[in-house]
Amino acid sequence: MSNEITFADLKLAQPLMRAIADAGYLHPTPVQAQAIPLVLAGGDLLAGAQTGTGKTAGFTLPILHLLTAKPVANQRPGRPRCLILVPTRELAAQVEESVQTYGKYLALKSMVMFGGVNINPQIKALRGLMDILVATPGRLLDHVGQKTLDLSGVEILVLDEADRMLDMGFIRDIKKILALLPKQRQNLLFSATFSDEIKTLADGLLHTPGYVEVARRNSTVELIEQSVHLVPQKLKSHLLAHLIKHHDWKQVLVFTRTKHGANRLAEKLNADGIPAAAIHGNKSQPARTKALAQFKDGSLPVLVATDIAARGLDIDMLPHVVNFELPNVPEDYVHRIGRTGRAGSSGAAISLVDSEELPFLKSIERLIKREIRKVAVDSFVPPANLPAEAPRPPRPAHGQRRHSHTTASAPRPAGAGNRNQPARDGQGRKPGNPQPRNPQQRDPQARTGQPKPRAAQKPADQQHLSEAARHQSMPQPALFSPKSGRRGK
């Protein structure tokens, strides 16, 4: 469809057409070709579009057109006409960049706000006029609480990557924000997946919406070459360094499951002579911005990221994505590898899989309805005399997310936050287990004077092995097979 339609067919304002031409685009992507006319018509929209489909321009272009076509007299400072809510700082910056790119020939003003930076410059900026506000929910509510922001003039609301916002526990914040908006407005909801939670949110938010779905739920881009290297956990960093050097990879986005793991891997790669930086929620915003800018311009070949921090990253022609550890939620695999193979370009997604991760791999393969090719890296020679590593803590139950204060089998609390951040209760306090003041209350045996019974011993096959013993027992032929002429991609 996009090969037949040009942007000229979409009847956008001439200043927008000039900006589109400057960006080098002629044909809209499928989601743009379907969404832009529906938004221009003024109705609500429910769009299923994964990252890399061009969805951001699918709503920024028609919004810029609508706001230009219907100017407002006597506009007041700090009172935006369009509110775009996004889950992360990186995505907020990316959407604002799109607004600036396509709106550069228009008189409209825009602003981006997110946490992790000084709030005072944002307060100062809110004293001026603005048409479009791109924000993360938490910082937006901070400004509402300080009465520096007026949402009574919002004509268009966009929830971008709504599934991720719900996953990060923003549903309460979203409901608070919705209560502050005018009843009469246009609502646009974009989501990569359509869970029951998303359907419930859409039912309460949208009124007879238009519907667009591009790249069906949990589908993976055909142009992405997916492969798996079976490798013990303690050898992963060595294998990754080998792959980067052996294949002379110039730009690699690496996913880890934890912030600490991202830091540790970046340090190991740097020690091995490969420039790398980690981005995650504990990094300052200037550090994250600097690392991303260096990665985009090619001066930093390796960016190590957690799932949340990578949300919103938009790098043209990204050739390689590496899963240093598989996500325990299969849908996150689809989000991760969607960073490569964008806009018709090819890309490679490589997963380094330890024996403990095989159940996660099976779930991913069931989700994408295909078996991922297992590749032996014949050129890799493991280093000798590796120091023993401490056993890793048990992973969350298959298909469940890790939380700092809950066990893998515990139900996720309503409104739980970022999976990389501790969950908080409804009063904003970190949950904990208050200890009784009387020490005897902690141990019933202390009151009776009877010795505590020994805990039942687990069978030998269920006890945790040492790191060395566990990996010695792991089948290795997929990694250390005889020379066969095949090479890791």
Image: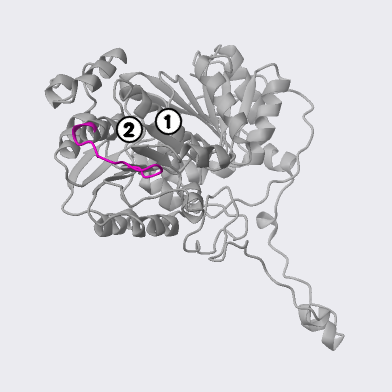
The residue under the point 26% across, 31% down is: 64
* Element marked by disc 1: helix
The residue under the point 38% across, 37% down is: 129
Residue 1 as seen in the image, left or right of residue 143: left
Q: Earlier in the sequence, mark 2 or mark 1?
A: 2
Q: Calculate the distance from the C-alpha at mark 2 to the C-alpha at mark 1.
A: 9 Å
In which quarter of the view is residue 213 placed? top left
* Residue type for callout 2: Thr
Which residue matches tag 2?
56
Which numbered disc covers residue 458?
none
* Element marked by disc 2: helix
Q: Residue furthest right?
A: 449
* Dominant SS in magenta: loop
* Residue type for callout 1: Gln
> Quadrant location of the N terminus?
top left
Vertical placement of residue 463 versus 75, above or below: below
Which residue matches tag 1?
94
